[in-house]
Image (cartoon, rainbow, N blue to C red):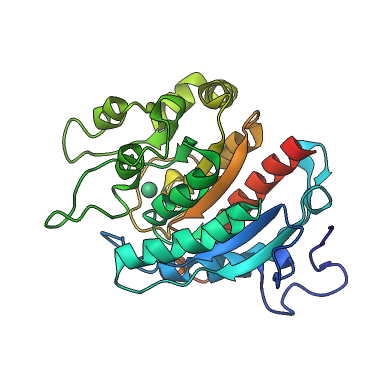
Amino acid sequence: MNVLPVNSLDTPRFCGVPTFMRLPQATSLHGLDAAVIGLPSDSGAPFRTGARFGPNAVRAMSVMLRPINPYRGNINVFEKLACADVGDASVVPGYEVESLDRIEESVAALVTAGIVPFGIGGDHSITLAELRAVAARHGPLALVHFDSHSDTWDKYFGGKAYSAGTPFRRAVEEGIVTPGQSIQIGLRGSLFQATDISQSLDLGYDVVTTDEIFDIGFKALADRIAARTAGRPVFLTFDMDFVDPAAAPAVQTPEAGGPSARETLQILRLLHGLDLVGCDVVEANPLYDGPGQITALLAATVLAELMALLASVRG
Ligand SMILES: [Mn+2]
């Protein structure tokens, strides 16, 4: 199956229902290699809610993107991968556990059909539901996690276990990621406790702080990620607060002093050797984005780069 997006040289970008990159909206999962799915829950957000509006905001700006990726040998992503936009998982606003269950069910339907899910969040708690669904098929996963925060805290607000601040501790406890083959990239900023970074190391994750990214360089980082995850299926999760708030202001929990948009894309374009079985981009919140929608545009571009990564591996 070869399904191409609407050609923006024939039909202007502002025409039509905005699916991701103007892909067809799937009416069937048959024959698909990859699918974009909106995961519009922000019931796990400790700070600025509104990521429930993320999927459609990212889709709206994704009409800017073109199918050929010049950073990976002019690959036409959609000639390599049969892709579609499958719409959104349903959620239960205000009910975190129930929303995670519904997201897991929707993602499981894709994974069971042999499709690589590309999720658009949603706050970061949704990734736990995706990991549950993907690990059910592929076994414990290598996690590649771009974020200015570890999201490995234990409990929030009267003992709540499920939150945008806890998914990667829960995932280790549930045995659905292999921390010894997983890596967190981009941590920076002030801490609740002196142990906020060592708690990730104690769980078994490798950690590369934002400062270390610039110390070791982007190529060495990409090589370290490939070596860390070698031999295991990879789930890559990208929190938009990895990026400096000057380039991605519209996130739940902005953290000053991050990589620029250009530096972020350079890093993603150097990734190689990953056996990608699932991806997401989370925490884009258009309520804080302003009329330029720059966070949504960058989120769309991040997801497109990850699709090109998968296409280059499958090619
Ligand atoms: Mn996060």
Residue 64 visible from this viewpoint:
no
Q: Nearer the viewer, residue 111 or 6?
A: 111
Question: Observer-nearest residue: 264 or 131?
Answer: 131
Q: Residue 197 location in percent, x, y?
A: 27, 31
Q: Position of residue 71 (x, y in %)?
A: 74, 38
Which residue is nearer to you in this view: 30 or 79?
30
298 lies left or right of 168: right
Report the residue that reaches farthest toward the bottom: 16
Residue 186 rendering spot, x and y as whole percentages:
42, 36
Q: Position of residue 195 (x, y in %)?
A: 19, 30
Q: Residue at x 34, y 47 (%)?
A: 167
Question: Is residue 300 positioned above or below 260 on the image?
Answer: below
Is residue 291 something that shows in the picture?
yes
Residue 185, by quadrant, is top left
Indicate left or right for 90 with 279 as reference: left
Q: Which residue is most to the right?
A: 10
Q: Residue at x 27, y 55 (%)?
A: 162
Residue reaching furthest left?
Answer: 158
Q: What residue is rendered at 77% in x and 58% in y? A: 31
Answer with the quarter of the image where residue 172 lies.
top left
Quadrant showing the C terminus: top right
